Image (cartoon, rainbow, N blue to C red):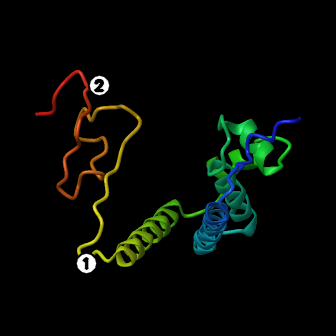
Amino acid sequence: MAQPPRDHAFVKTTKPKAAAAVSLCAGLGRRKRAELLALMRPSFARVEPWLQARKYAGAVSSGLPRRNGWSIAQQVGDRTPDRTQLLLNRACWDTFAVMGVVRRFAVSGLDEAARRSGRRRGLRIGALDESGQEKKGQATANAIFACGASPLYASLSSSCPA
């Protein structure tokens, strides 16, 4: 018996409610991604980079075991990674506007989740930085901690912040 492709997720259960929940969550994820990408459309000068961004977002959010230019190109149906590299390196689009759209979209989703759960004071959110790099100066990552928060250093750090 042949194995399913790696990018396919299968649920094996005898409980119809669990299978239906998985199916509904996958559909909701696709709809939310389409909604977010539609909100990003005005940030692109031409339609071609926006279409490539849609394909790129789908590939990055898929279950690719390794994400590099060639695997992403294969996932989105391109022969070479040139189109994605053009999008990321030279295409005309407003990155700050896209970051703002993503930020507002995420905050509205968290607000909606807080309302659904009945919390009046919102949700507490933690952010993890997987880079493992310490802040070593005044010029790096200032915007992240501009709101007065201080970074938490994991035990992997060899030095403690002052």
Picture residue at 83% right of the left edge, 49% below the top: 77
Q: In which quarter of the image is the C terminus?
A: top left
Q: Which of 42 and 124 is in front in this view?
A: 124
Q: Is residue 120 left or right of residue 98?
A: left
In this picture, is 28 found above or below 155?
below
Residue on which the image places disc 1: 120
Mark 2 secondary-structure assignment = loop
| Front-lying residue, 22 or 95 | 22
Label drawn at residue 32 = none
User: Where residue 160 sits in the image (x, y, percent)?
Assistant: 16, 28
* Residue 158 position in % (x across, y down): 23, 21
Q: Which amino acid does label 1 sit on?
A: Arg
**Residue under circle 2?**
156
Tell me which amino acid carries mark 2.
Leu
> Dot 2 surroundings within 10 Å: few (below 14), some, or many (20 or more)?
few
Residue 90 appears in view: no
- What is the spatial separation of the Cα atoms under label 1 and label 2, in whole angstroms? 36 Å
